[in-house]
Image (tube, grey):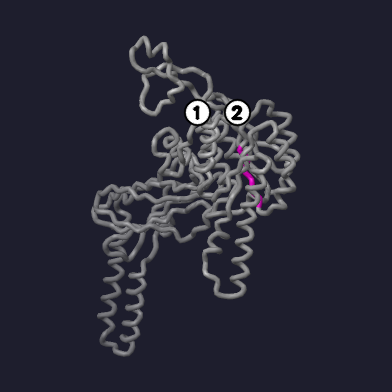
Amino acid sequence: MKRLFKHTYLTSRFFKIVGALVGLYILAYIFPGWFPIVKMFFFISLGLVLVDLILLYKQKGIHASRILPKKLSNGDDNPIEITLNNNYNYNTELLLIDELPFQYQKRDFEIKTKLKSQEKKKVTYSLRPLERGEYYFGNLNIYVNSPINLVTRRFQYGKDAVVPNYPSFLQLRKFMLLAFSNKLFEYGLKKIRRIGHTMEFEQIKDYVMGDDIRNINWKATAKRNHLMVNQFQDERSQPIYSVIDKGRSMKMPFNGLSLLDYAINATLVISNIALKKQDKAGMFTFSRKVDNRVIAERRPSQMNSILETLYNVNTDYSETNFVRLYVDIKRNITQRSLLLLYTNFETLDALHRQLPYLQAIAKNHLLVVIFFKNTELHQLTKDKAESTYEIFQKTIAEKFIYEKKLIVNELHKYGIQTILTTPENLTVNTINKYLEIKARGLI
């Protein structure tokens, strides 16, 4: 009986009938002759409630299950599937309320649907997580009405489910396919003209239109009586390190995702592509100290090590120590490597404070400094200014945008390569730069 009351709720139709009965009883007090009729309506209503309860509790009712992925992909739409099975012998209307993880702070999530008798159905919705970590799902609550619709029965399933939210592995899969197909240009990845090639011989093949005529093998051509060319392999097994700044400059959010998490997602993708290109991929993070280190290698388990390390990156967004970064690189990375440094500089003064250390790093390694455009400022400059205050805001925004361009020029002046990108295009532009460096044989 206790369970019956716990999972039973009264509908709005029930309260409307109760309100109508109260009104009729008031009228019956004024007109005593109506009292028997009102009393009859009362017992009919009570009987309908009892019939409604029998219809809802006599049969097995609704069976449901929530199908969660083994892990969520940070910053992406993750499908959540709910399977429903109606065991009633009548059509029902359902209200699904899934208790989402506390990170969403959403208390009004609900899905309405209908099920025919003995029908099975799948309902899908998507979640876009914005913080790495564990996501706790509560109960899956299903509220069912019979055709009488005076009482609602609640079913509960799927209590206490936990799903970890990892860096964007969905993005990793997408770009892994694109990096080895001819569809890269659709995503802004341009073809790079090769300036030279290495001397690592691969094979002799038939000449086709577009092959470099300088690679024609004349001896093989004489033997086969048609043009043959030497084919060379790209330089392989170069160390590629992703270096992620965990300082306060990376806390700024864009579309709900922090710059740090954009950098983490890009690191996962570029590490995978580097490994597929036969290079060694590694990473580490820094703020007050250097940690979360994965040595650049080509082991079969390398991607799993990088993924787990990125998942466990924690920070208090303290002030970044570039001195510690330089000392650590000098001590631990002895082979010339490609260093993809994810950080952010808002002003030229901020760059000048760290420029001596970036120059020192660039002497022994190929350094690419990756920092971000402020998309809010760009939007502000496009809006029409209609007051003195708005003109002032627009002028300041243009000043900061221009200062970003000065930062790029300043780094180029000292031979340091740069990527100035919007957060959403970070991954594409990082892949672009990596392919360009590989094609030009700079590393």
Q: Pointer 2: residues within 10 angstroms few (<14), some, or many (20+)?
A: many
For numbered disc 2, what is the local secondary structure?
strand
In magenta segment, residue 382: no
User: What residue type is disc 2 on?
Assistant: Pro
Disc 1: CA contacts within 10 A as few (<14), some (14-19) or many (>=20): some
Please determine whether, in this image, residue 441 is positioned above or below residue 170. above
Residue 232 vertical placement versus 71 (above, below) = above
Q: Which residue is mark 1?
A: 277
Single out the residue that lies furthest toward the bottom: 30
> What distance separates the C-alpha of mark 2 from that of mark 1?
11 Å
Q: Which residues are magenta?
A: 340-345
- Image quarter where the N terminus lies is bottom left
Q: Residue at x 46, y 18 (%)?
A: 202
Question: Looking at this view, is 103 or 301 the one in front?
Answer: 301
Identify which residue, 368 or 341, lies in the foreground: 368
Amino acid type, label 1: Lys
* Residue 220, position as x, y percentages in the image: 40, 12
Query: In which image quadrant can residue 375 be found?
Result: bottom right
Identify the mark nearer the N-term, 2 or 1. 2
Tell me where residue 341 sits by quadrant: top right
Query: Toward which corner of the image does residue 206 lie, by quadrant?
Result: top left
Residue 374 in sight in this render = yes
The outermost residue toward the top is 223
Residue 69 in the image, given as x and y percentages of width and height = 44, 41
Label of residue 180 in the image: none
Q: Quadrant of the C terminus?
A: top right
Q: Residue 288: where, in percent of width, then height?
A: 73, 43
Element at label 1: loop
Residue at image location 42% in from the left, 37% down from the top = 178
Left or right of 216 on screen, residue 59: left
Q: Which residue matches tag 2?
A: 239
Q: Residue at x 61, y 62 (%)?
A: 397
